[in-house]
Amino acid sequence: MTCPPVPNTAESAEQTASPPSAITPQAKPWLSVIVPVLDEAATIAAQLGELAALRWQGAELLVVDGGSADGTARLAHALADRVLDSVRGRAAQMNAGAAASRGEVLLFLHADTGLPPAAAGLIRAVLAAGAAWGRFDVRIDGPQPLLRVVERMMNWRSRLTGIATGDQAIFVRREVFERLGGFPDLPLMEDIALAKRLKRVGRPACLRQPVRTSARRWQKHGVVRTILLMWRLRASYFFGADPRRLAVRYGYSPRQH
């Protein structure tokens, strides 16, 4: 089964994106954007700056630092509603952010990923249509032609299977996230594990408007090598391999996200 059809989100986004109005500390935000970070000083200011418009549309922004040694948390303070300290690990950091947040909807955004301009209205529209959770298509921010193939395959696979990855900016109603126990405590594949739980509630809303994610992971070790590694890891996880052992194969280390 593929992802169910979504409403005319472009039109709905225009209708729901109200004029900017800052929320007060007493006002309850409708959306909580949770960004786990680790040593992102070089790019964190630019990324959080792009999210300023969401804050003016009634969203709160929480940055959850996993022990950065480069001043990431200090740089984030002026650009986020809250900056939290957490034990390292994306799952633990995102769960900590969710626990501290106040929004009815949670949006988990990787530190190297940017949202489309109408993200708030798009999310509102599909949730108003009855979706419990969803994700965006992804575009990898790099010039290599092979990356266009990679992103198309990622989007097609997600639409076909109903499984989303963290690169696709997963959003979910708070009560659903809490009822399912949040992200499993895993060092790798925590996004896929959560998506499998969410599928029990319903298929995701698959928004075709893409988020933009950095190509740094692909460029660091080479596009082809990274593709083959990720395929092997996901196939191993599908057949029951321990995510902790997969994390070692992935190269997960105490200073790496």
Image (spheres, rainbow, N blue to C red):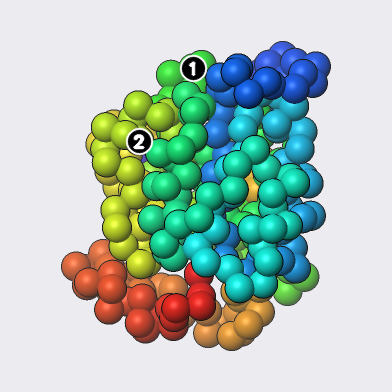
Q: Report the label total.
A: 2
Residue 233 versus residue 24 in the image, above or below: below
Structural crowding at the residue carrying mark 1, measured as other residues with C-alpha within 10 Å and reported as few (<14), some (14–19) or many (≥20): few
x and y percentages locating residue 112 in the rendered image: 65, 60
Tell me if residue 257 can be seen.
yes
Residue type at the position of mark 1: Ala
x and y percentages locating residue 89 in the rendered image: 42, 64
Identify the disc placed on residue 159. none
x and y percentages locating residue 92 in the rendered image: 38, 56
> Residue sitting at 73 percent across and 74 percent down?
144
The local secondary structure at tag 2 comes to: helix
Please identify, in this view, whether the residue under mark 2 or under mark 1 is nearer the observer: 2
x and y percentages locating residue 41 in the rendered image: 71, 66
Q: Nearer the viewer, residue 251 or 7?
A: 251
Residue type at the position of mark 2: Phe
- 144 left or right, relative to 203: right
As measured in the structure, the alpha-carbon distance from the residue carrying label 2 to the one carrying label 1 is 18 Å
Residue position marked by numbered label 1 in the rendering: 129
> Residue sitting at 49 percent across and 28 percent down?
102
Structural crowding at the residue carrying mark 2, measured as other residues with C-alpha within 10 Å and reported as few (<14), some (14–19) or many (≥20): many
Identify the disc placed on residue 177. 2
